Amino acid sequence: MPDTPAPASRDWMADQLADHIATAEAAGPLLPQVRAVADLLCASFANRGILYTFGNGGSAADAQHLTGEIIGHYKRDRRPLGAVTLSTDPTTMTCIANDYSYDDVFSRQVTGLARAGDVVAAFTTSGRSANVLGGLRAAREAGATTVLFSGGDGGPARELADHALIAPSTTTPRIQELHTFWLHVISERVDAWAAGDEAFA
């Protein structure tokens, strides 16, 4: 008869929760910067600007999450707003990666699409992904406003961001959990603005 594994200790879960709470509390001072990003998006959408988002892996999922809340809706019945996630088109992604380099998959799309008045938001837990850096550089060259969702010290991406939301953690799960919170409150603010709900001004 095979040995039955001992039940896992609950301590590691409690440790993870405590770390999550501590990271969230440490991020409190960043709320004015998060509001500034939300207001930036409202101003861009008011002038028919487009939000372009991108990232790799879990950060690509976060980028797509934000786009879905913006072009769909968060809670309210309101008009769709312009938002595109650059990692969701496998044909374009693999075309660029094959013909040029994986490092170019975001920069070529940003160069072809983004213009002054648009917002380009990059998600990267390390701030060091070469393709994300390329996308941010291309956005600046196009005259778009750049937003960074990152963690730790923000890496070299921080220098390419007009607005940098840097999670006070070096642990990927904690960083991504905070990114989800930020994209939710940003979505709430943008959603309310588009619906004329002044309670979330």
Image: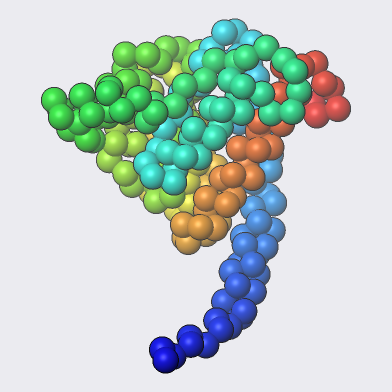
> How many numbered marks does the figure carry?
0
Viewer-proximal residue among 25 and 95: 95
Viewer-proximal residue among 80 and 135: 80
Q: Position of residue 45 (x, y in %)?
A: 60, 14
Q: Which quadrant: the C terminus?
A: top right
Farthest front residue?
1
Q: Position of residue 154 (x, y in %)?
A: 44, 48
Farthest left residue?
99
Residue 7 position by quadrant = bottom right
Residue name at image x 60 percent, y 15 percent: 81
Q: Can residue 137 be seen here?
A: no
Compared with 171, 30 (above or below) is: above
Viewer-proximal residue among 93 and 5: 5
Residue name at image x 35 percent, y 21 percent: 110
Q: How is the image coloured?
A: rainbow
Residue name at image x 35 percent, y 25 percent: 89
Q: Position of residue 163 (x, y in %)?
A: 53, 34
Left or right of residue 100, residue 81 in this image: right
Q: Can residue 106 be seen here?
A: yes
Farthest right residue?
199
Residue 101 position by quadrant = top left
Compared with 10, 30 (above or below) is: above
Q: Which quadrant: the N terminus?
A: bottom left
Left or right of residue 165, residue 92 in this image: left
Farthest top residue?
47
Left or right of residue 185, residue 199 in this image: right
Residue name at image x 41 percent, y 89 percent: 2
Q: Position of residue 24 (x, y in %)?
A: 66, 56
Compared with 5, 90 (above or below) is: above
